[in-house]
Structures are given as C-alpha cells and as structure tokens.
Image (spheres, grey):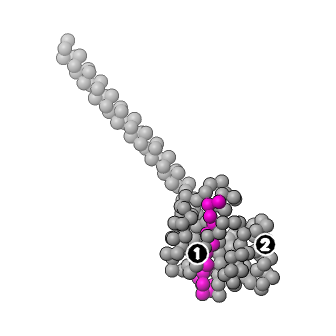
Amino acid sequence: MVIYTVGTFDMLHVGHLALLEFCKTLGDVVAVGVASDSVVNSYKPNVPVIPLDQREEMLKGLRCVDIVRPYHELEYVSACKELNVDIFVIGEDWGDKPHNIAVESYLKAEGKEIVQVLYNPRTSSTQIKQNVIDQRRGMHIEQAVSNIDENTQINNKYKNHMSEMFSTST
C-alpha cells in the first residue's frame, strides 16, 4: 500500500517524525509531498526558513520515508494519480479549500482512503521559530544589560581615577 502525506516540513521536528512514523504503520511505501516556497507563500505569510532542497534531503534521510517529491502548485490529485496512492494522510487543519475538495473527490471516486490525524501538541515549526525569536530578543536584552553594566563599571573606574587624580593634585 502507498501512503501519501503533504506538508512544508520546515524546521523538521518530533511532530513531523511522529506523523511520518504513523504513516509507515499504515502501509509499505510512504511518499511525502513537500511544498515549495512559492506554494507555502500562497497560504502563509512567510516562506520556509529551510530551503526546499534541504527539506527534501532531510526527509529522504528518514527510515520511515520512501519517496520524497516537491510540489510547486497547490494541487494534490496529480501526485495521487502518479503514485497510485491508497491512503492520503491529512492533518487536523485540513480545510474545505478547492484543492482539498478536489483530492477528496478523486480519492473517494477511486475507492481510496483518507486518514486525518491530530498534530503532536509537543511542538510545531511555528513554535520553534517563535522560541528562536524570543531567545534572540532575550539575548539582545541580556547583551544590552551587560553592555550597560560594563559601561557603568568603566564610568565608575574613570570617575574614581579622576577623583584620585584631582584629590592628589590639591
């Protein structure tokens, strides 16, 4: 059986791994469609942090993934036909956009199955990115405080030095 799932797979994390390992329990071949930057940018405000070729390479390195193929249009029917997909695994955020309805109709007409999974609440690429931003902000704040402390120490040394110079000269 051929299992197919799609996604951005930016900032590959344990939630992605759990999804892909689950897919492997459903069949013999796991095929992963990886959204190109232009596809992601068509429905999200930012393009992925990790370039498409690197996201593909990381997915190919996983034992639970057999086929990795990018997609450059927000359309899934052609891949399902080419791969002769038996089960299409979708996430909980699957909506009723035209490209989703089209693949659902095709799979239903072909007698294929759609399995919807809940996302792993432990992590997400969006949360990882936000954590990095927050840490970076924290570093800037810590660095600024450190610079202020350092400048204060330098100023105090200078004041002490100047004070000693003027007190000894009088």
Number of marks in picture: 2
Examine the rendering and report whether any part of residue 118 can be seen. Answer: no
Q: What quarter of the picture does the C terminus occupy?
A: top left
Q: Is residue 31 magenta?
A: yes
The magenta segment is 23-38
- Label 1 Cα crowd, 10 Å radius (few <14 / some 14-19 / many 20+): some
Residue 14 or residue 10, whichever sits in front: 10
Q: Please say if 87 is above or below 74.
A: below
Name the residue type under label 1. Val
Horizontal side, residue 24 vs residue 142: left or right: right
Residue 58 or residue 168, whichever sits in front: 58
Name the residue type under label 2. Ala
Secondary structure type for disc 1: strand
Q: Read off the residue under disc 1.
A: 68
Q: Earlier in the sequence, mark 1 or mark 2?
A: 1
Specify the quadrant of the image occupied by residue 79: bottom right
Task: Please name the residue shown 81% across and 82% down the image.
Answer: 109
In percent of width and height, residue 23 lies at 61, 80
Q: Read off the residue under disc 2.
A: 102
In percent of width and height, residue 48 lies at 58, 59
Q: Is residue 64 magenta?
A: no
